[in-house]
Image (tube, rainbow, N blue to C red):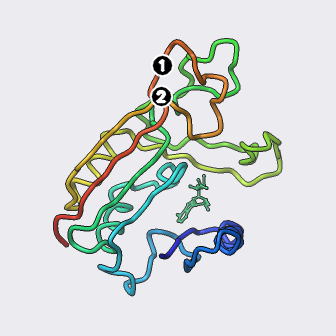
Amino acid sequence: MVGFDISDNAIESARLLSKKVDVECDFIQTDIYDISDDYNNRFDIVYISTGSLMWFPDISKFFKVINRILKVNGYVLIYEIHPFLLLLDEDNHDNPYELRYPYFRKEPLVFNDGLDYIGKVKNESALPSYNFDPTLSQIINGLIQNKMSIDQFEEYDHDISSLFGHLENDEIQIPKSFFLCGEKVSD
Ligand SMILES: C[S@@+](CC[C@H](N)C(=O)[O-])C[C@H]1O[C@@H](n2cnc3c(N)ncnc32)[C@H](O)[C@@H]1O
């Protein structure tokens, strides 16, 4: 197994966690766009987990890399935050279903208050972060354009973002997460 992440801190904590649960895995610090050709046609499964796709300005280019590192007939499994959920403001508890952000965007959303969505601590001196938040069709087309078929697609009403716990068990069930399984058809 190999885990890729651009952040030294994420790599360090992944190494600690894998040691703790006694699972052997290599962790490589790299931008996904720059994964070395040494990994071409190497993997049976690529797993993309929560909060990953939003960071990539060109989602088709992202899936081009996924195709490159998968073996033919290998699977890409995506378990992600549903793009619809990202239209809401997680801090608006009075009117939680009010739409705050546009679905179709030409420019990324820029946040300047830090990224501590777990501890909810704002950091005004943080560097800006840019969220590209692909639409569902951009994600699906990203796979199709890069020679991957869609084998399974599921939408769920449970939250995996850590941002919308207050909507859990609400009568109004909006899509909060999804699972997509694609298969590499050819190089
Ligand atoms: C929200 S976290 C995902 C955490 C992980 N899915 C989990 O559930 O624990 C997003 C991760 O994407 C990484 N990331 C952002 N842009 C990246 C890029 N261009 N290449 C590789 N990793 C990137 C960040 O460093 C961060 O660790």
Position of residue 5 measured from the top left corner of the image (x, y, whole percent): 57, 68
Q: Quadrant of the C terminus?
A: bottom left
Q: Amino acid at mark 2?
A: Asp
Position of residue 96 measured from the top left corner of the image (x, y, whole percent): 62, 17
Would the CB of label 2 be found within 8 Å of ligand 1? no
Would the CB of label 1 be found within 8 Å of ligand 1? no
Q: Which residue is mark 2?
A: 157
Left or right, residue 58 beside residue 150: right
**Dot placed on the residue nearer the N-terminal end, 2 or 1:** 2
Position of residue 33 measured from the top left corner of the image (x, y, whole percent): 44, 69
Q: Quadrant of ligand 1?
A: bottom right
Q: Is residue 25 above or below residue 109?
A: below
Q: CA distance from mark 2 to mark 1?
A: 6 Å
Q: Seen from this angle, which residue lies furthest left?
A: 186
| Residue 173 - label | 1
Q: Seen from this angle, which residue lies furthest front?
A: 22
Left or right, residue 125 beside residue 171: right
Position of residue 9 measured from the top left corner of the image (x, y, whole percent): 71, 68
Q: Residues within 10 Å of mark 2 (few under 14, many from 20)?
A: some
Q: Are marks 2 and 1 in contact (CB under 8 Å)?
A: yes
Q: Amino acid at mark 1?
A: Gln
34 and 85: which is toward the camera: 85
Secondary structure under the numbered disc 2 in the rendered image: loop
Q: At 37% across and 84% down in the image, what residue appears?
A: 37
Q: At 68% across and 20% down in the image, what residue appears?
A: 92
Left or right, residue 127 beside residue 168: right
Q: Residues within 10 Å of mark 1 (few under 14, many from 20)?
A: few
162 and 30: which is toward the camera: 162
Secondary structure under the numbered disc 1 in the rendered image: loop
Q: At 37% across and 55% down in the image, what residue appears?
A: 77
Give the tally of numbered discs: 2
